[in-house]
Image (tube, grey):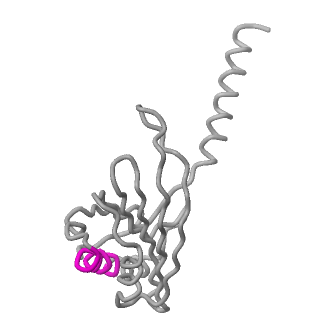
Amino acid sequence: MSHNRLVHIARATGCLGLVVLLSGCDFFYGVHREAQLQTMPQLDCVGRVIKATPGVKHLQTMDAVTGQELTLSGLPQEGPVYTFTYTGTAPDKLWGTVQLQADSHGIRFTNDDMWINEKPPQTQVDATRPVMRTIEQGLAAKCGLSDLPVRVREYCTGVVCKPL
């Protein structure tokens, strides 16, 4: 086989591999709010605050053990993920998820309205974001996370996040 033929095959195989690799990528759209905390709040307090937040009609909780995070110093054991999924009723279509997880940096707090490969409706984003902030303020006031509101960073992908 000639050198030119091998180069052509290698390029074609590389392009095909790139296409296969890219076709497996998922894109995330929506609102992601996160903060690093020093202590884990009482989980029953978190649930009470979310459930009592105006606009929240339903709350579902779940605990799950995750895999390990790869770091330069090895594989530290990650803690369980505590998930609180909250929803409202139509016409708001309010939807969000609070997650708490102990990791190698402390406690990771997230508050999301994220969709995979599809953008959430803007009306849902507009209904959910103020509730996210109200939940965070409630956690600060009632669950010992007084600095949570100032630590939260918000990232909006593929949606419009107007000032709150």
- Residue 157, position as x, y percentages in the image: 40, 61
The image shows residue 60, relative to residue 23, as above or below, that is: below
In the image, 59: left or right of 157?
Answer: right
Residue at the image point whose x is 35% and y is 87% from the top: 53
The image shows residue 23, relative to residue 123, as above or below, that is: above
Can residue 28 be seen at all in this image of the molecule? yes
Answer with the quarter of the image where residue 62 lies: bottom right
Is 142 within the magenta?
A: yes
Viewport quadrant of the C terminus: bottom left
Residue at the image point whose x is 71% and y is 8% from the top: 3
- Residue 131, position as x, y percentages in the image: 34, 81
Can residue 117 be seen at all in this image of the molecule? no
Residue, far top: 2
Between 9 and 119, the one lying in front of the other is: 119
Residue at the image point whose x is 72% and y is 14% from the top: 6
- Residue 96, position as x, y percentages in the image: 44, 75
Viewport quadrant of the N terminus: top right
| Range of residues picked out in magenta | 130-143
Answer with the quarter of the image where residue 22 lies: top right
Between 108 and 28, the one lying in front of the other is: 108
Is 124 within the magenta?
A: no
Residue, far right: 1
How many numbered markers are drawn? 0
